[in-house]
Every structure is written in structure tokens, then in C-alpha cells.
Image (cartoon, rainbow, N blue to C red):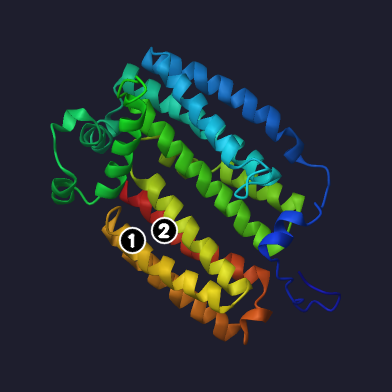
């Protein structure tokens, strides 16, 4: 991102169509092994899920959501692409592996850390709640939004004959974390284009983050918070890279919606959209004009907000 004199070069702005059609910057690296790693990790995850829950439904649920996610993010889908598909498969397989490990600790070793909030959320999300309405949920917990989503997933799988095991909600959490990773990849592509080396590094870093494993593997609402925060980062980067009226309207609408949604997930996270607003205004002022904003500045803004948001989730848990 710098020229020969050491000054920051003007950042190329990539449109959505350019991002999808841009030639890939090829090079040797770990990216060529993502497919093999994904397949191996998912097979191991299925074995662990089967051992943890002693039920064929557990790995079957994982396979179903993995196939659906693969279709959604396939290169032929307008939401997907080659990098997005590879990222989703890798993120899901690794997170589902650790979900199997967490399941073994819960079922066979009675993990105390999962017997409080996680089991409480499981009870509220399933028929064990005893007919508690959605309005009553808001008075019981601030995580009513996540519980409502889990109820929808449980109702869907129950309608096709599945039991209401914890593995269903955990598979859903794993999907949310995996989608967060795909959004991160899309954000990087808006900044750097189809740079395979950078995208491969990002995928490796995301897939190896223990906090994200935790969000996926335990029945807690932090996977929903992660996805919402990551989407908010993407919308901000989209605006900063191309500050047009349409992008500004999208940013305003999504920021207002996110403030409301955070109230149904973690009320203390209402500050995240406001913090991003402060960071975005600061970036605009420091950059002189948004069009000359360096890629490093955008990345620093994203990491700064993400660190406060994701770190807050971990400390709260």
C-alpha cells in the first residue's frame, strides 16, 4: 500500500462487480490445503458429535447445515464466491470440531462452565420452557433475540422429525460464526480485491481464533453478537470505500437497526454502533477526504472496534 518514497498510495476502490470479477493474485501458500483440512476436520467433528451425544442426529444436523451453507456461498450464488465458499467450509468444520469437544466435556465430564447460562438458554429455547411466550422472554433475559432464533431453528428441525437436542442450536451458532468469517472475507475483498495471499492469511487467522471457537461451541448468544458486529464493520467499510448516498443510507438504516437488535442480545453493546460512528468520523477527518483514506486506516478501525466488541463478549462470558 506504499510507493517507493514511502508515502501511502491512493487506495483502489472496488465495486461489488469488480470484487467478484477481479483476477486472483495467485501464489503458494496454505490456501491450497483448505479443502483437505475442511474435509478432515468435519469428519473428526462428526465422530466427536456422535460420541458426545450418542445420537446419529448430531452429525446429521451438522451435515445438513454445512450443505445448505455450501449452496448459499457457492460461486454460482450472488452471496458467494470461491474464497467465500472455502472460508465457510473451513470455519464451519473447525468450529464444529470444537463443538464436539465441548459436547464431550458437557455430557461425559459434566463441565460446570456449561451448566449455568448454556443450559438455561437451552431450556428457554426448547419445549422445556413450558409455554413461555416471546414477550415473557424479554422479562427473563436480555438474550431474548438469540432465544427466539433458536426456537425457530428447533421448530424447523422438529417439523422434520428431529429431537430437540443441544446440538441443533450449537450447529446454528457454528453457522453464525462461519457467516461472520465470510463477511470478514468480503470486507477484506472490498479493500484489497482478490488478493489470495491476504485472503488466505485472514482465513487462517479467523479459523484459528479460540474466542470464535468458544462462540460456536457453547450455547450462548455471543455468536449472534459476533455476526451483527461483523456486518456493521462491513457496512462501514463499504461506506468508507465508496461514500455515496446509497451507501450512506444503508449505513444509517443498518446502524439504527443494530442498536435495536443489540438490545435483544446484549444491552451493554448498544455503544458499538456509536463507537463505529466516532471512528468513522475520525477516519474521515484524519483522511482529509474519505476517498484518500488508506487501507491500513480502514483495517485499524475494524480491528479496534472488533477488539472492543469481541473482547467484551469474552470477558462477559
User: Could you tell me residue 49's position as x and y percent?
Assistant: 44, 20
Residue 65 vertical position relative to residue 72 in the rendered view, above or below: above
Seen in the image, is 116 located left or right of residue 169?
Answer: left
Distance Cα–Cα, label 1 vs label 2:
7 Å
Q: Quadrant of residue 50?
A: top left
Q: Number of marks in the image?
A: 2
SS at circle 1: helix
Circle number at residue 310? none
At x 47% / y 20%, what residue is drawn?
59
User: Could you tell me residue 273's position as x and y percent?
Assistant: 40, 68
Seen in the image, is 81 located left or right of residue 98?
Answer: right
User: Could you tell me residue 269's position as x and y percent?
Assistant: 33, 61
Q: Quadrant of residue 156?
A: top left
Seen in the image, is 203 located left or right of residue 168?
Answer: right
Report the residue marked by disc 1. 269
At x 19% / y 46%, what residue is drawn?
134
**Nearest the eye: 52 or 307:** 52
Q: Quadrant of residue 119?
A: top left
Contact flag, marks 1 and 2 (Cβ < 8 Å): yes
The image quadrant where one finds the N terminus is bottom right
Report the residue marked by disc 2. 309
At x 68% / y 43%, what residue is drawn?
76
SS at circle 2: helix
Amino acid at each position: 500500500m506504499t510507493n517507493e518514497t514511502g508515502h501511502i498510495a491512493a487506495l483502489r476502490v472496488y465495486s461489488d462487480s469488480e470484487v467478484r470479477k477481479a483476477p486472483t493474485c495467485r501464489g503458494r501458500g496454505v490456501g491450497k490445503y483448505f479443502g483437505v483440512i475442511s474435509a478432515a476436520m468435519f469428519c473428526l467433528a462428526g465422530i466427536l458429535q456422535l460420541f458426545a451425544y450418542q445420537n446419529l442426529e448430531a452429525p446429521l444436523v451438522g451435515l445438513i447445515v454445512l450443505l445448505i451453507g455450501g449452496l448459499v456461498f457457492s460461486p454460482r450464488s450472488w452471496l458467494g464466491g470461491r474464497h467465500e465458499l472455502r472460508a465457510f467450509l473451513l470455519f464451519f468444520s473447525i468450529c464444529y470440531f470444537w463443538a464436539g469437544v465441548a459436547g464431550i466435556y458437557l455430557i461425559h465430564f459434566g463441565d460446570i462452565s456449561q451448566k449455568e447460562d448454556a443450559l438455561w438458554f437451552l431450556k428457554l429455547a426448547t419445549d422445556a420452557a413450558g409455554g413461555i411466550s416471546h414477550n415473557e422472554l424479554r422479562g427473563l433475559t436480555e438474550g431474548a433475540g438469540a432465544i427466539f432464533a433458536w426456537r425457530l431453528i428447533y421448530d424447523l428441525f422438529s417439523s422434520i422429525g428431529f429431537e430437540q437436542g443441544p446440538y441443533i442450536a450449537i450447529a446454528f451458532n457454528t453457522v453464525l460464526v462461519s457467516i461472520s468469517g465470510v463477511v470478514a472475507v468480503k470486507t477484506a475483498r472490498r479493500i484489497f480485491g482478490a488478493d489470495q495471499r491476504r485472503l488466505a492469511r485472514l482465513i487462517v487467522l479467523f479459523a484459528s481464533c479460540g474466542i470464535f471457537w468458544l462462540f460456536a461451541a457453547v450455547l450462548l448468544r455471543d455468536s449472534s453478537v459476533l455476526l451483527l458486529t461483523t456486518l456493521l464493520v462491513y457496512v462501514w467499510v463499504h461506506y468508507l470505500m465508496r461514500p455515496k448516498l446509497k451507501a450512506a443510507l444503508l449505513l444509517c438504516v443498518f446502524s439504527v437497526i443494530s442498536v435495536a437488535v443489540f438490545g435483544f442480545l446484549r444491552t451493554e453493546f448498544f455503544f458499538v454502533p456509536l463507537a463505529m460512528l466516532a471512528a468513522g468520523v475520525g477516519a474521515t477527518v484524519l483522511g482529509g477526504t474519505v476517498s484518500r483514506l488508506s487501507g491500513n486506516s480502514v483495517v485499524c478501525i475494524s480491528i479496534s472496534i472488533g477488539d472492543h466488541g469481541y473482547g467484551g463478549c469474552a470477558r462477559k462470558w
